[in-house]
Image (cartoon, rainbow, N blue to C red):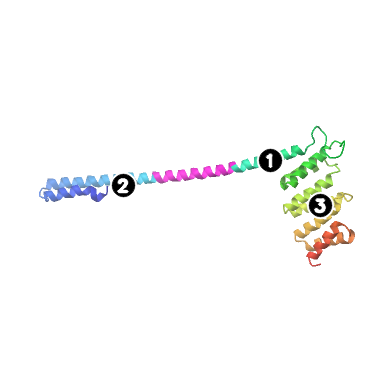
Amino acid sequence: MSARTMMLPALAALLVVGCGSEDQLRRVEQEVGDLKVEIFKLRQVVEEGNKKAQADQQAAAEARSQDRRFQADLQDSLRQVQDTTRVMNNRLNSLPKGGTKVAAEPQPAPTAEDERALNAAVLDYNRGNYPLAAEGLDLFLTTYPQSTKRPDALFFLGLCHYNQRAFDRAQIAFDRIIKDHAASPQFLPAKLKRAQCLLKQGLKPAAVKAFRELVDGFSGSAEARTAQQELSDLGL
């Protein structure tokens, strides 16, 4: 009810008495004053109600936002658990059953522990899970320092870093093969990938030198042909 509507009875009374009596006039003035007080109180109640409604709406909006964040975090956690579960299942399936390596050859020899560990990491690499594969390969290199599979582990470790565009770290892995395992089948592939790492890092002169070493020193190899193609792509 508006202030104008609430004051109508008082004004009507004022018109009726025609201001002929001072007592009646004072009573009308008192009633008008009382009405103003009531209107002020009503306005306060309305304003407080509006503030409470706004606060309730804000609290509800924040609750909905928190619920959406919780649901998103929950979904992300579930996806991570599912991915980890699939990886572990694949690893379990790749392990030999009954202590014997499953292979096509008759009477296969038992698979060595270091080879199983390497195969598990390579499986992660083949699935494109490069961070997990790199973690497994680092663990392999620490656990089996004398393994004959170290050149393979270093090469896959370099590939993991290369595929994650960490070319400086990839180069370190390939350098270790070139320095410590020159007789390994991974020697030439490591030299080629090292040269490509140099190129990816913007070290063109060093990369060109490394490519030429392959072309001149190992002509006829697949790595030399790839190195020649890299030089051609550079306009050399």
Of labels 1 and 3, earlier in sequence is 1
214 relative to 15 in the view: left or right = right
Q: Is residue 154 magenta?
A: no
Q: Quadrant of residue 110?
A: top right
Name which quarter of the figure residue 94 lies in. top right
- Residue 210 shows up from this direction: no
Mark closest to the chain's N terminus, 3 or 2: 2
Viewer-nearest residue: 10 or 89: 89
Residue range (magenta)? 52-74
Drawn side of residue 7 relative to residue 108, left or right: left
Q: CA distance from mark 1 to mark 3?
A: 29 Å
Judged left or right of residue 47, residue 187 is: right
Above or below, comparing residue 3 to residue 81 in the picture: below
> Of all residues shown, which one is farthest toward the left?
20
Per the image, the residue denoted by label 2 is: 43
| Residue appearing at x 75%, y 49% in the figure | 160
Residue at image mark 1: 84
Q: 51 above or below 219?
A: above
Q: Amino acid at mark 1?
A: Thr
Specify few, some or many for label 1: CA neighbours under 10 Å numbering under 14, 14-19, or 20 or more.
few
Residue at disc 2, secondary structure: helix
Dot in front, 3 or 2? 3
Q: Which residue is mark 3?
A: 174
